[in-house]
Image (cartoon, helix red, strand yellow):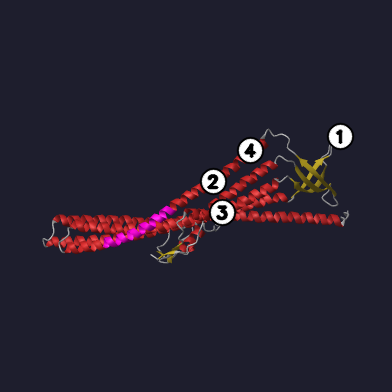
Amino acid sequence: MRLPSLPPRLRLLNLLLILLLLLVLATGCTTVREARQIQREDHVSPPGERTVSAEEAGITQGCTLTLEQLEQIALRCQPALYQMRLEVERARLSLANARSGYLPSLSSSLSHSRSTQNTDPHRESTRNRGSYSGGVNLSLTIYDFGRTSAEVQQAQDSLSAALKSLEEQECATLYQVRQSYFQLRRAVELHAVAQEAVEQYRDHWEQMKTKRSVGASTEYDVLKAEVDYQQARLQEITTANGVALGWTDLNRSLGLTQVPEYRLGECHIQEYPQNVSELMALAQETSPTLAALRYRVRMASGALDAAIADLYPNLSLSLGGSLSGRNPGLPWLWNLNGGLSLGQSIFQGGRLANAIRQAMLSLQSARSSYADGEQTLFRSLTSAVLTSTRARLSREVADLAAQAAQRNLEIVNEKFRNGKATSVDRTDAQVSYSSAKAEAVNARFDYLEAQATIANLLGDSSRPGHALPPQ
């Protein structure tokens, strides 16, 4: 039996339904394929999702890396920064979901059923008849008194806050690298001071043993010289441990573990004015921490708008169509439907009013958090400026003290060779000289670390300014 052909309009409708179904399936398959790829054990994760090797990071045996190059490695490999980038992507998806509220919702269905048609208990039969049906439904919210708009604005502010949090994490990553770099450079220079002291005390010990052999010194002088030398060696070991730990901390700040030996290159550090009010005014505009807190205030305000919108009705439009038939062959019967609906919650036990009050409290809490962030930032800037000012003056004084101690050591050594100074005088002069050089090193790096702290508080990642030569 030949089935009657469908009218052109129905054939077009069937074709559109099939194409729509294929499009939905293709989109879903792509997403599922990506998800399964991520789950696979042989999936190659990007840096930050795993610990990369030194070769991948661009570090080879004996190479020289400047501070700027170390910062770029950390921005690529640091897991904490990678996690913040994922948070930004999640916020983007949340914004896309919120904006989908402006779009219609489309659904489809397809079903088949078979059943017997027995009505006489004396003439039962297993003969059955089947039916087929399919349908497409479309729904669209026409007006919801700003509920969807509030959710979209809240999601947009959440994305902006996530971007500022990412910027804040970038600054924190750079700050950690700079702090580790300066601490390592400090440890290296203090180790050099300790090594110089060891050489000085070794020479003095040898002199004492020589003098003792000719009767020009006492046994106590030789013993004291040896004790001073051994104490200097202990100090050298302590500073060497500091250098080893400094390398470990620096590599950890880069997001790396086992790294071959490399050399530290030069760095440039921005120097800031020592005026807290001026820096605070600048921080109001540039600090990512304050910017993220401001967006969180806006998020709380958007949540309050959404809670208020829940008090109002929701107007929506629905459209649909269906096809049905007794046989799998065509033609099928088709029908269309449509309508408007207005929904309004009458009573929910005070839940909506309480939700508004909770949103009000969240907004007030967000504003309080911003005020606390301002005060914390001002206090941190004040501390950094005071540290910077003191370190600058200490550096100048320490440099002069180191020059004076060096000159005094030269004079005492000359007197000691001529028998006009004791070994105690010589030891005291050596201790004063080593301490003065260590103070000069500490004051210089205290100043550089204070400048790095100010840069972090301002959200400034620039480096021009004070230059530090390679190590």
Q: Is residue 101 rendered to the left or right of residue 368?
A: right
Amino acid identity at mark 2:
Ala
Residue at position x 54%, y 45% in the image: 369
Q: Which residue is disc 4 drawn over? A: 357
Magenta residues span 385-406
Q: Which residue is disc 3 drawn over? A: 164
Q: Which residue is disc 1 drawn over? A: 120
Q: Is residue 221 rendered to the left or right of residue 403?
A: left
C-alpha distance separating marks 2 and 4: 21 Å
The secondary structure type at the circle numbered 4 is helix
Q: Is residue 200 magenta?
A: no
Q: Nearer the viewer, mark 1 or mark 4?
A: 4
Circles 2, 4 touching at the beta carbon (< 8 Å): no
Amino acid identity at mark 1:
Asp
Q: Main secondary structure of the magenta part?
A: helix
Q: Nearer the viewer, mark 4 or mark 3?
A: 4
Q: Quick one: which residue is furthest to the left in this view?
A: 215
Q: Earlier in the sequence, mark 3 or mark 2?
A: 3
Amino acid identity at mark 4:
Arg
Q: Earlier in the sequence, mark 1 or mark 3?
A: 1
| Location of residue 110 in the rendering, given as x and y in whole percent from the top left corner | 77, 48
Residue at position x 24%, y 61% in the image: 408
The secondary structure type at the circle numbered 2 is helix
The dot on residue 371 is 2
Q: Is residue 389 magenta?
A: yes
The secondary structure type at the circle numbered 3 is helix
Q: Earlier in the sequence, mark 1 or mark 4?
A: 1
Q: Is residue 177 rendered to the left or right of residue 319?
A: left
